[in-house]
Image (cartoon, grey):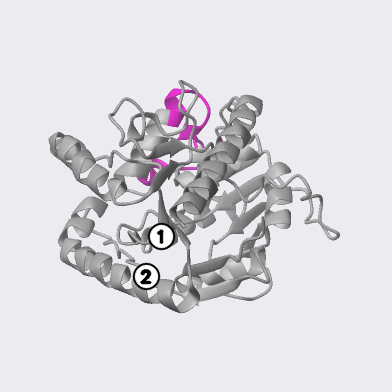
Amino acid sequence: MENNVTIASGEEHLSLFRNELPGLSYINFTGFKPVYSRILPQYLSVFFKIPVLLFHIIAEHRTLNKIIAKYDIDIIISDNRFGLWNKKITSVYVTHMPLIPFPKPLKFFEPAGAFLHSKIIKRYSLCFIPDLPGEVNLTGRLSHGIRLPDNVRYIGILSRFQNPDQGLTENPLKIHRNTVILSGPEPQREILKQKLVTILKDKEPHTIIFEGKPGKSGDAKSYGNITFYYHQPAPLMKEVIETSDNIITRSGYTTIMELVSLNCTALIIPTPGQTEQEYLAEYLSGKGWFRTQIQSKINAENLFCPGRSVLHNEIIRQSKILLTGALNELLEKQHREN
């Protein structure tokens, strides 16, 4: 069965999709972009922007209705965007945290938050959780040990690096041992970058820093013993990561899944005040699969601390089965509704 795929996203992410998936249709569909503070904890910054978030949910829901009519859409898959459901077509909500973690002083709000989140999930035809359902999982209590709506399906981990045809590039980068993968919102991305540059610029071995800015262009830049890239295509990033002895990154869930797909471990540094990343760092380091360090305490002595890799083969095997089953159910559901 052939399907016409249209990708809707903010312009920065569309640059990534155009590079990785050429030949598709694209729509500029900007979502809510939280701006974090250098002073306030992340959860307080988000709390003060709840009215803006609610406005965006209503606005994007209305915009989606127009897109569906204009482009004759019959399936919509939404990555954690609350307003992208429509009762006239099949809609899928993708999230790795039905339970949204709160900071410890506000943890008693978590059941209420999970209840409200379940109400959003139920508006969709299906909800896909990119994780495994059993004891071997990457999300812990974010999606396990809680009551989930009947339309929830685990689909295994997702990664742009799982394509078996991604081989070595024609002009591989020189072998190195340190790779830094930056991601997440400003100003914390830049704060972490400057801390790492100060430590690594005069140290051996060589370090490559991926700045995670696909919307920007430009050749590699060097400073001391560091080479910077705004972004690189998946085959080259895969090669760099796999030839690294030491990887340093945020504990964002997309990055975690990509590292697991490559059977790689890393030092993961959660974004300060971002409770989801703080929990994932604690949970995964507790399993011994990754090592973690808080941003304010990183130094030359604790920056290099690899953990052991996860149960890679079993996770990949289960993920293929789960994803195939979920996609078949989605297409069958859409066929029945039409």
Residue type of the residue flagged with mark 1: Ile
Residue lying at 33% horizontally and 35% vertically, measured from the top left: 150
Overall secondary structure of the magenta stretch? Answer: loop
Is 292 a magenta residue?
yes
Q: Which residue, given by chain and number where applicable, does mark 2 sit on?
A: 64
The residue at 64%/76% (across/down) is 218
Mark drawn on residue 89: 1
Percent position (x, y) of residue 257? 54, 41
Identify which residue, 63 or 202, lies in the foreground. 63
Front-lying residue, 5 or 281 = 5
Q: Is residue 206 visible?
A: no
Q: Is residue 10 left or right of residue 321?
A: left
Q: Is residue 186 left or right of residue 299?
A: left
**Which percent across, then down, holds residue 86?**
34, 61
Residue 60, given in percent of the width and then of the height, sits at: 32, 69
Q: Residue furthest bottom?
A: 70
The amino acid sitting under disc 2 is Leu
Which residue is found at the position 51% from the left and 36% from the top?
301
State which region is magenta. 284-304
Residue 315 falls within the magenta-colored stretch: no
